[in-house]
Amino acid sequence: MNPISISLAVVAVVMGGAMLGGYVRQRLPKHHLEGDTRDIVRAGIGLLATLSALVLGLIIASAKSSFDTKTEEVQTAAVKLLHLDRSLRQLGAAGENARQELVQMVRMRVDQVWAQRDPMAIATKSFDEKPNLETLQVAIRAIPPRDDAQRAAVAKALQASDELAQVRALVIAQRGSGIITPLLIVLVFWFTIITAGLNLFAPRNGTTLAFNLLCALSIASAIFLILEMDQSFGGVIHVSDAPLRAALAQLAR
């Protein structure tokens, strides 16, 4: 889903509702816009506005939670990489080849993810592209420990690599959008009804048009933020690569 295209479509739909309300106002008999009729329409608009606000808040909270989860996964991966690097450093010269492979793997994966904006595809591809976690684990297991301290370092390195593999599996399992599309469509429909109902009782002039446009842009901006946070690596609002870049700088020292 392209957030900008969808947001522009939302503006068009909501403005269409406003224009429909103004058109119906001109066609309805005057007594249909007064007294009890006006009251019941306004009550219905208030009900829909409340429902829309609640649903919009829930969707934004869900998108923000998903965005925060992916940010936390990136930070967790950076921490695991530093733990793995520390264990390999404890092995001295015996762990240097594995460290170089780790640096090469991390640099390649970070560049790929933040260039292609698709971590799920990169995580899936990492099973085949080398160096990867599997080849790194082979290199770690091939290190001959000379004493108990080195055996403990090898064990910790393997544990850290296993934890990185779990993070990768979690990224793959989270493939797809967390946004419920029918719910988003219903929400836009409600906003369209609200703007149509408001324009039943509003005169057609420049002020009304400007206010309708501002409302449509505000609604579209909320939808835009939701879609951007749902596509955490592929849009204007995306998860920062700073934790992994900082970890990479430490690995390369």
Image (cartoon, grey):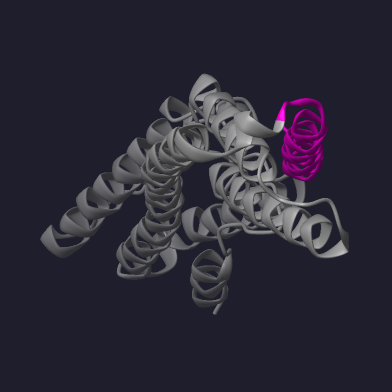
Which quadrant of the figure contains the N terminus?
top right
Residue 161 appears in which quarter of the rendering? top left
Residue drawn where x is 42% and y is 62% of the image:
78
| Residue 190 place in picture, x, y as percent | 54, 32
Residue drawn where x is 49% and y is 25% of the image:
183
- Left or right for 228, reference 81: right
Q: Does the segment drawn in magenta span residue 16?
A: yes
| Residue 68 place in picture, x, y as percent | 40, 55
Q: Nearer the viewer, residue 48 or 167?
A: 48
- Left or right for 111, reference 243: right
- Left or right for 150, reference 184: left
Residue drawn where x is 82% and y is 34% of the image:
26
| Residue 106 place in picture, x, y as percent | 57, 55
Visible residue check, residue 62: yes
Q: Nearer the viewer, residue 47 or 249?
A: 47
Picture layout, residue 90 above or below residue 222: below
Q: Which residue in the rendered view is the most extreme toward the front?
A: 31
Give the tally of numbered discs.
0
Q: Nearer the viewer, residue 152 or 108?
A: 108
Picture layout, residue 159 above or below residue 103: above
Q: Which residue in the rendered view is the most extreme toward the bottom?
A: 253
State the predominant SS element of the stretch in magenta.
helix
Q: Which residue in the rendered view is the most extreme toward the top?
A: 182
- Left or right for 125, reference 211: left
Q: Does the segment drawn in magenta span residue 22?
A: yes
Picture layout, residue 89 above or below residue 38: below
| Residue 7 place in picture, x, y as percent | 74, 43
**Residue span colored magenta:** 1-29
Visible residue check, residue 142: no
Q: Which residue in the rendered view is the most extreme toward the right?
A: 206
Residue drawn where x is 68% and y is 39% of the image:
200
